[in-house]
Image: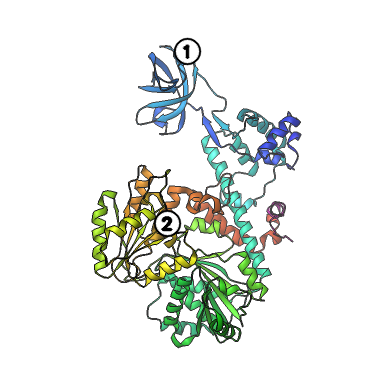
């Protein structure tokens, strides 16, 4: 066992143990799994083998006198030339002018630092005179606080491995090690701390990438299985042929992606456990149609359906679209905060007596006085995630319906697998035939006069425009356009027949609804807004989306904003006003003008920004892995997920002796996560 106190390691007294405790290390297990955050490479390689921007070590003879120049306040730059093999390498060292006396022409030196392959230049971190040969050329470097040095940590870990390596248990079945050619747990730990070569270090990392992802996916699958077993669903029984007849009479043909997603949803609804599925797809990909067919299946099963949305205007839009799809086949009612008095009582009675088949509404759907006759399926639309309290409110009514979440934010598959691991995920990743892509352009701000002329022409043809700003009011910190100032500017610029509206997050909900209703009915022709219009409202008459300071937004957010236009059958346009200074910002603008596929954009956004920034670090909900990277290791993530599903649903943890060590480890590790084991 390695869950013993850290002061069991030879040489670790109470004071040192207290220092380790400050960085969260209290046991030998904590210590062995405290992996280096980087490695210093003292391996001497030929110049031709060195990689650009890597930390390297080179050896050679100093040529000529080093030159020191001073700049700023007590800052210096030392430049020396070193003959290495066939070439002269320039060495640069900052703020160490004393090195000039130590490094004389003809001295043989060993230099370690960052390599610039293009300039044959090394930025020196460390230098030593003479030939230096390390017994272990790849040296681990650990995160350390003031009370601990990396060298101390390395020394204690070396001692812990010497004492306890024989007590490290293997938790993966032997078959997995053979099939995936993985190092044993003991060997991988040794190599991660003290690599014998970069090749073995790579194999050690690969072992723990897989282990971390498998353990996480097992947790997700076990939670999902237990939730299913504890939650008996509606087990909705419907005649599939009747549902297919409804699909056949729709005024459009489902895409393959819509059909695939629909089949997954209908299978869940017919199953004995409660559906907990996420349906994601681009704006205009046809999520609402799939949701409508799912609601119809509930009606065929003799139950009611409900669709819950964040705003009243969106609820009204869903009501109109569902009524046009269902015709006389269903009674659909609207229940929002604005429905009051006698009208509200009538609708509540219809819901309770099963006279209403489908109920569309906001949070009003789960208020105390709403009593469903027999609720089968709840669709939850957009950002508005159906939280624990809302589910509890439904359960308190004696209801446990199938739940389908819908989002128009395309989430990369790797993030969907990790972030929504306890949910099933369906993707509509293709657009209906004939839909016109939004034409996207990137311009500088000096093009604004021409843009305003273009908007005026669109308005003259009867269309409308959005203008998006990152900030509401002027900021001293950020020199970017703001909504209030721009609103005032555009009011003065446009002709009298153009009404300019303003929408931002500081308005009360009633004021937001009022502005959006006016825009939806074309009483407002130009809507200046912050990103509150990113999701939700449907205005097919809007054909122009202008986004100020577009470099300040991520690709996914830009795509969401672009999705506010192009919702009718008229050609629409998105103009990005941006002057990005960095390469990432320029690349983002280029990608936006060339790509209209939301899932492709989301994947590229993930590559550019990383998983934390994709969702926003605070609310990302992503697990933190020590070795794995869900962006780079997406293939291992897919493999781990498939293996975890097989292990859990074939009950291998309980039935197969080869999985006993993994079973015991999970039982110990997940004891505080509410997961029970036999």
Instruction: Name the disc covering residue 304, or none.
Output: none
Q: Which residue position holds label 1?
A: 102
Examine the rendering and report whether any part of residue 597 can be seen: no
Q: Quadrant of the C terminus?
A: bottom right
Q: Nearer the viewer, residue 525 or 580?
A: 525
Does the stretch in magenta take in 670? yes
Dot 1, crowdedness within 10 Å: few (<14), some or many (≥20)?
few
Tell me the element at label 1.
Answer: helix
Q: Whole-percent x and y of residue 637?
A: 53, 54
- Tell me the residue at 55%/45% (across/down): 206
Q: Nearer the viewer, residue 139 or 393?
A: 393
- Tell me the residue at 44%/29% (across/down): 114
Does the stretch in magenta take in 165? no
Q: Whole-percent x and y of residue 589?
A: 34, 51
Where on the picture, by quarter, is residue 602? Answer: bottom left
Examine the rendering and report whether any part of residue 233 can be seen: yes
Instruction: Name the disc covering residue 557, or none.
Output: 2
Q: Earlier in the sequence, mark 2 or mark 1?
A: 1
Total number of numbered labels?
Answer: 2
Tell me the element at label 2.
Answer: helix
Looking at the rendered image, the disc whose residue lies closer to the viewer, 2 or 1, is 2
Q: Whole-percent x and y of residue 436?
A: 31, 67
Left or right of 648? Residue 18 is right
Dot 2, crowdedness within 10 Å: few (<14), some or many (≥20)?
some
The answer for how far apart the CA atoms under marks 2 and 1 are is 55 Å
Q: Is residue 376 above or below residue 153?
A: below
Stretch of the chain drawn in magenta: 660-678
- Tell me the residue at 57%/49% (across/down): 210
Where on the picture, by quarter, is residue 560? Answer: bottom left
Model colouring: rainbow
Q: Whole-percent x and y of residue 273?
A: 63, 72
């Amino acid at each position: 066992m390695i869950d013993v106190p850290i002061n069991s390691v030879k040489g670790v007294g109470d004071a040192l143990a207290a220092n380790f405790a400050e960085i969260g290390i209290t046991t030998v297990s904590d210590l062995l799994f405290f992996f280096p955050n980087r490695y210093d490479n003292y391996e001497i390689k030929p110049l031709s083998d060195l990689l650009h921007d890597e930390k390297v070590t080179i050896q050679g003879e100093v040529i000529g006198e080093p030159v020191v120049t001073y700049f700023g306040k007590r800052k210096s730059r030392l430049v020396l030339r070193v003959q290495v093999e066939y070439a002269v390498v320039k060495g640069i060292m900052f703020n160490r002018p004393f090195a000039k006396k130590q490094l004389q022409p003809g001295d043989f030196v060993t230099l370690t630092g960052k390599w610039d392959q293009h300039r044959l230049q090394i930025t020196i971190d460390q230098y030593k005179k003479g030939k230096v040969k390390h017994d272990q050329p790849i040296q681990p470097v650990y995160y350390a606080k003031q009370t601990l040095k990396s060298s101390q940590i390395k020394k204690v870990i070396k001692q812990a491995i010497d004492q306890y390596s024989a007590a490290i248990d293997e938790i993966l079945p032997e078959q997995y090690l053979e099939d995936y050619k993985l190092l044993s747990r003991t060997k991988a730990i040794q190599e991660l701390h003290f690599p014998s070569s970069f090749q073995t270090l790579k194999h050690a990392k690969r072992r723990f990438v897989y282990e971390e992802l498998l353990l996480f996916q097992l947790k997700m699958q076990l939670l999902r299985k237990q939730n299913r077993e504890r939650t008996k669903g509606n087990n909705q029984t419907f005649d599939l042929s009747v549902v297919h007849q409804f699909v056949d009479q729709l005024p459009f043909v489902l895409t393959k992606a819509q059909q695939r997603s629909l089949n997954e949803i209908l299978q869940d609804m017919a199953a004995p456990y409660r559906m907990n599925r996420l349906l994601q797809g681009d704006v205009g990909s046809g999520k609402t149609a799939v949701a409508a067919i799912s609601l119809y299946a509930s009606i065929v099963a003799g139950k009611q359906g409900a669709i819950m949305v964040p705003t009243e205007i969106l609820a009204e839009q869903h009501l109109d679209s569902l009524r046009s799809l269902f015709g006389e086949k269903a009674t659909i009612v609207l229940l929002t905060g604005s429905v009051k008095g006698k009208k509200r009582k009538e609708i509540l009675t219809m819901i309770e007596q099963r006279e209403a088949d489908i109920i569309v509404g906001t949070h009003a759907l789960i208020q105390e006085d709403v009593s469903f006759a027999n609720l089968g399926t709840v669709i939850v639309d957009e950002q508005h995630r159906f939280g624990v309290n809302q589910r509890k409110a439904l359960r308190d009514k004696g209801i446990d319906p199938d739940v389908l979440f819908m989002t128009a934010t395309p989430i990369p598959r790797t993030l969907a697998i990790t972030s929504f691991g306890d949910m099933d995920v369906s993707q509509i990743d293709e657009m209906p035939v004939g839909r016109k892509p939004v034409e996207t352009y990137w311009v500088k701000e000096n093009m604004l006069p021409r843009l305003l002329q273009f908007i005026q022409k669109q308005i003259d043809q009867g269309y409308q425009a959005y203008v998006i700003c990152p900030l509401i009011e002027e900021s001293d910190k950020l020199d970017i356009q703001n909504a209030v100032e721009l609103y005032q500017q555009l009011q003065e610029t446009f002709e009298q027949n153009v009404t300019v509206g303003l929408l931002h997050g500081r308005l009360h909900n009633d004021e937001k609804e009022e502005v959006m209703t006016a825009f939806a009915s074309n009483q407002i022709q130009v809507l200046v807004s912050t990103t509150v219009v990113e999701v939700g409202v449907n205005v097919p008459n809007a054909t122009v989306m202008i986004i100020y300071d577009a470099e300040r937004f991520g690709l996914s957010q830009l795509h969401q904003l672009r999705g506010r236009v192009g919702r009718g059958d008229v050609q629409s346009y998105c103009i990005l006003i941006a002057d990005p200074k960095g390469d990432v910002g320029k690349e983002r603008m280029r990608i936006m003008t060339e790509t209209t596929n939301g899932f492709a954009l989301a994947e590229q956004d993930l590559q550019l920004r990383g998983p934390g920034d994709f969702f926003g670090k605070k609310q990302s909900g992503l697990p933190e892995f020590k070795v794995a990277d869900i962006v780079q290791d997406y293939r291992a993530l897919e493999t781990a997920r498939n293996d975890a599903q097989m292990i859990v649903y074939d009950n291998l943890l309980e039935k197969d002796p080869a999985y006993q060590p993994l079973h015991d480890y999970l039982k110990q590790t997940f004891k505080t996560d509410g997961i029970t084991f036999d």
